[in-house]
Structures are given as C-alpha cells and as structure tokens.
Image (tube, rainbow, N blue to C red):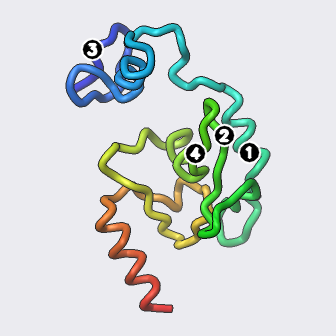
C-alpha cells in the first residue's frame, strides 16, 4: 500500500507514509509546507565526518560518539544516530518495528552495506553470539 497523499509513492501503513504521518502529528496538516528531508545539506555534513578509506570496508564515524561508540549527527535540530541516518540516506527508511544491526560488529561504522534492519530480539541474539565468540 502506498501513501494516499497526492504525488507521494512511499510505502504506507494506513493512509499515510511515516513522513506525512509525522507532518500531521507536528503541524496538523499532511501537506504542511516543510520539506520531507528538512536539511538538504545533511549528506554534506555526514561526509565531512566519515573516514571511508579503511581496509576493512568500514566507514569510520569521526564525529561525536557516545560511550558505546555510536556516532551522532544533527538533523533538523535533533541529534540522531549516524548509522541510522546513513542507512536512510542510502538504502531506505527503517521500519518503526526494526533496529539496525551492524554486521561488522563496529558500532562506529556507518557503511550501509554493513547494516541490516532486524528485530530488537534478533539484534540482541547476534550481539550475544558475537560476544561469546570473542
């Protein structure tokens, strides 16, 4: 099923895609005059903080990180995890019921080829299996 908003071909749950649903929640109008990707310079900002020349194929996030190593980037005035932004920029939106698993096991990696959307339970199982092997 696709979004019922005119000229929107995004997948939808119910009548609207997640972007139009958020517009409704924030502004009370699915056609509010705000862009779906608010800052077009997100991509430029993202690449200024990535070291992609690593031999292992990981794209190292060189911007701010939390204690677990997850990178953060500002998008539309909010702090978001850099690996999630990378996945959404270069692959697709992440379904609300899924999380991103780093297949390379590097929390600082933002290479979308090293990521897979999975359930939280599956992500925890994979993480526990990787810790038991090391």
For the residues carrying marks 2 and 1, which lies nearer the camera in this image?
Answer: 2
Instruction: Check whether the beta carbons of the residues at disc 3 and disc 4 lie within 8 A of each other.
Output: no
Horizontal arrangement in the rendering, residue 78 relative to residue 27 (left or right): right
Question: Any mark on residue 4, and which?
Answer: 3
Residue placed under numbered mark 2 in the picture = 74
Q: Are marks 2 and 4 in contact (CB under 8 Å)?
A: yes
Mark 1 or mark 3, earlier in chain: 3
Q: Which residue is mark 4?
A: 80
Give the Cα distance between marks 3 and 4.
28 Å
Q: Earlier in the sequence, mark 2 or mark 4?
A: 2
Q: Which residue is mark 1?
A: 47
Do the CB atoms of the residues marked 4 and 1 lie less than 8 Å apart?
no
Badge number at residue 97: none
Q: Is residue 84 above or below residue 68?
A: above
Secondary structure at numbered mark 1 = helix
Local crowd at mark 4 within 10 Å, few (<14), some, or many (≥20)?
Answer: some
Counting residues from the start of the chain, the first of labels 2 and 1 encountered is: 1
Q: Secondary structure at mark 4?
A: strand
N-terminal of the pair, mark 3 or mark 4, is: 3
Residue 8 rendering spot, x and y as whole percentages: 37, 16
Earlier residue among tags 3 and 2: 3
Could you tell me which residue is drawn at 70 percent across and 43 percent down?
46
Mark pair 3, 2: CA separation = 30 Å
Which is closer to the viewer, label 3 or label 4?
A: 4
Q: CA distance from mark 2 to mark 1?
A: 13 Å
Give the Cα distance between marks 2 and 4: 6 Å
């Amino acid at each position: 099923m696709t979004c019922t908003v005119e000229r929107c071909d995004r997948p939808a749950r119910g009548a609207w895609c997640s972007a139009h649903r958020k517009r409704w929640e924030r502004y009370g109008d699915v056609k509010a005059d705000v862009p779906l990707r608010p800052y077009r310079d997100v991509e430029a900002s993202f690449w200024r903080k990535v070291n992609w020349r690593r031999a292992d194929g990981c794209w190292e996030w060189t911007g701010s990180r939390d204690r677990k190593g997850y990178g953060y980037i500002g998008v539309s005035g909010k702090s978001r995890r850099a690996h999630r932004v990378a996945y959404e920029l270069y692959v697709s939106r992440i379904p609300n019921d899924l999380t991103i698993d780093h297949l390379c096991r590097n929390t600082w990696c933002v290479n979308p080829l090293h990521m897979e959307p999975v359930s939280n339970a599956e992500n925890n199982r994979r993480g526990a299996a990787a810790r038991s092997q090391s």
